[in-house]
C-alpha cells in the first residue's frame, strides 16, 4: 500500500554469503494512517456497540457484522487531493439492498436498519480520517524535504543505468550530511527530454541526465514512502520518483566520488 494505505512490502532480497542463504525483507508503513485507522474503527465499533446494547431483541453478532459490511457499499465520487485518492459517498447502495431484502419479513428490517446505516456512516468516518491524515502526514513527513525519502545512507550505493555514469561511486557520508540541505526545485520533464536529444550526437547516443539509480537507502521511519531515487550526472541533482509524483532536489556539493 502507498501513502494512503497502511503497510506495504518494499523488497524481498535473497543473498548467498559463505554458503548461507540470507533473506532480507524490507517494508514500509504509514504510521499516521495506521493510527488513524485504529481510531476510525474504534469509533465505528463504539457506535455499533451502543446501538446493539440498546436493543431489546438482540440479533446474532455475525449477522450484525454482515449487515454492517453490506451497508458500506455506496456510490462514491472519487477525487484526488494532495496526491491522495479521496472517496466521497453519495448514495447508500448497501442500505437500499438490505432494505429490499430484509423488508420482506416483518420486523427484520427494524432489527438491522441501524447497523446498515452505521455501515454507510462509516464511509464518512473514513473520509474524515483521510482528510485529517493528509495534513498531519505532511506536517510530520514534509514532501519538500529530501530527508523524508532518504534518512539513512549507511548501505546506500548507486547502480549505473547509463554508460555516461561509468567510473563513479557514491559518497555515503557526504550524502548523509547534505540530506537536510537538499532544496526542492521545480522542473519541466518535457524540457529535460528535449535537451537530452538536442545535446546528443544522435538518438543512439543520448545524453542521459540521470545515469545513476540510488539503492539501499532508508526513508524516514513510518513515512510509508517507497520511492525510486535517481542521481544526476554531476552528483548534485536527485530525482525522487513515487507512484504518484516526482520531486527534484539540488545539493550544494556533489555526492559522487571521482574516477576509480
Image: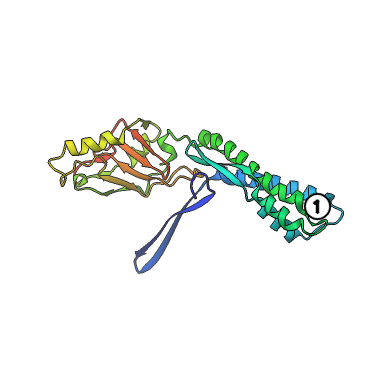
Please, which residue is most extreme toward the left here? 201
Color scheme of the displayed model: rainbow
Front position in the image: 167 or 198: 198
Rendered view: 97 above or below 16: above
Tag count = 1
Rendered view: 97 above or below 212: below
Could you say where residue 49 lies in the image, as x and y percent from the top left? 77, 50
Could you say where residue 223 lies in the image, as x and y percent from the top left? 49, 43
| Label 1: which secondary element | helix
Left or right: where does residue 53 sit relative to residue 178? right
Q: Quadrant of residue 14?
A: bottom left
Could you say where residue 116 lies in the image, as x and y percent from the top left? 72, 51
Please, which residue is most extreme toward the bottom here? 19
Left or right: where does residue 117 sit relative to residue 245? right
Front position in the image: 153 or 150: 150
According to the picture, the residue beneath numbered tag 1 turns out to be 110
Front position in the image: 71 or 197: 71
Amino acid at each position: 500500500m502507498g501513502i494512503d494505505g497502511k503497510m506495504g512490502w518494499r523488497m524481498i532480497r535473497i543473498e548467498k554469503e559463505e554458503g548461507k542463504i540470507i533473506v532480507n525483507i524490507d517494508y514500509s508503513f504509514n504510521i499516521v494512517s495506521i493510527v488513524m485507522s485504529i481510531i476510525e474503527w474504534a469509533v465505528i465499533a463504539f457506535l455499533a456497540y451502543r446501538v446493539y446494547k440498546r436493543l431489546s431483541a438482540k440479533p446474532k453478532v455475525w449477522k450484525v457484522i454482515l449487515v454492517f459490511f453490506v451497508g458500506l457499499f455506496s456510490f462514491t465520487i472519487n477525487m484526488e487531493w494532495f496526491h491522495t485518492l479521496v472517496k466521497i459517498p453519495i448514495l447508500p447502495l448497501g442500505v437500499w439492498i438490505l432494505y429490499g431484502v430484509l423488508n420482506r419479513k416483518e420486523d427484520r428490517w427494524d432489527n438491522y436498519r441501524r447497523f446498515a446505516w452505521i455501515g454507510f456512516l462509516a464511509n464518512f468516518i473514513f473520509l474524515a480520517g483521510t482528510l485529517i491524515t493528509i495534513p498531519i502526514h505532511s506536517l510530520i513527513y514534509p514532501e519538500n524535504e529530501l530527508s523524508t525519502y532518504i534518512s539513512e545512507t549507511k548501505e546506500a550505493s548507486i547502480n549505473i543505468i547509463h554508460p555516461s555514469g561509468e567510473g563513479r561511486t557514491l559518497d555515503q557520508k557526504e550524502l548523509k550530511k547534505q540530506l537536510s540541505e537538499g532544496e526542492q526545485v521545480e522542473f519541466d520533464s518535457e524540457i529535460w527530454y528535449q535537451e537530452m536529444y538536442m545535446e546528443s550526437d544522435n538518438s543512439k547516443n543520448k545524453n542521459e541526465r540521470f545515469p545513476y539509480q540510488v539503492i539501499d537507502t532508508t526513508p524516514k521511519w513510518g513515512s510509508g514512502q517507497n520511492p525510486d531515487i535517481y542521481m544526476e550526472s554531476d552528483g548534485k541533482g536527485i530525482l525522487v520518483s513515487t507512484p504518484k509524483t516526482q520531486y527534484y532536489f539540488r545539493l550544494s556539493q556533489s555526492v559522487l566520488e571521482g574516477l576509480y
